[in-house]
Amino acid sequence: MDADAEPEWSIETQRTYTPADSDREREYRTYRHESGDLRLKVAPAALDGDDHPGYALTATSYPGLELSETIHVRTVLTADRCDQIARQFMTLFAARYDGPGSLEDALEYAADRTRDHR
């Protein structure tokens, strides 16, 4: 998986690990927008208590603050696919984001366009 983030984003955390009950290596990665107001997480879905196999993409607005809010964007089977969706999300968010007043609009815009609408 390509470790480079989109221009307005940086990798905040990147880890690989092997769970005690498995021999398959897992990946965990968080990206932070240059504003510091949004974080994306690509991680095994089980870390968030989901029974669904695979990887989940979540977005947290205002991470670390009392008013922070996390939304589930999408769950897919592989880390590579989840990272592709995260990159698509980053691009869509950057196209709509125009400062703190537009964070919620840009977040909604990117999340809506990267969700599975079946």
Image (cartoon, rainbow, N blue to C red):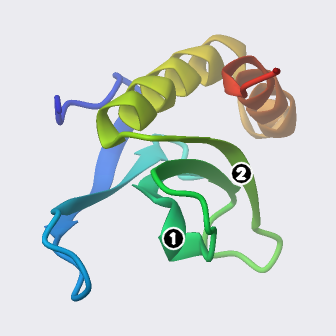
Q: Is residue 16 visible?
A: yes
Estimate how packed mark 2 is, as few (under 14), some (14 to 19) or many (20 or more) residues with alpha carbons within 10 Å.
some
Q: Which residue lies furthest to the bottom in this view?
A: 20
Q: Is residue 66 left or right of residue 6?
A: right
Residue at 63% x, 68% y is 50
Residue at 17% x, 63% y is 24
Estimate how packed mark 1 is, as few (under 14), some (14 to 19) or many (20 or more) residues with alpha carbons within 10 Å.
few
- State which tag comes first along the sequence, 2 or 1: 1
User: Height in image: 10 above or below 97?
Assistant: below
Residue 106 image position (x, y, % from top left): 76, 27
Residue at 36% x, 40% y is 78
Q: Can residue 98 be seen in this view?
A: no
Q: What element carries label 1?
A: helix
The quarter of the displayed image where residue 98 is located: top right
Q: What element carries label 2?
A: strand
User: Height in image: 11 above or below 24?
Assistant: above
Q: Mark 2 points at which residue?
A: 72
Foreground pick, 95 / 112: 112
Q: In this view, does 85 lie to the left or right of 63?
A: left
Residue 57 image position (x, y, % from top left): 55, 46
For the residues labelled 2 and 1, the Cα–Cα distance comes to: 13 Å
Going by the numbered disc 2, the residue's amino acid type is His
Q: In this view, does 8 lie to the left or right of 4?
A: right
Q: Which of marks 2 and 1 is in front?
A: 1
Going by the numbered disc 1, the residue's amino acid type is Ala
Number of numbered discs: 2
Q: Name the residue under label 1.
A: 46
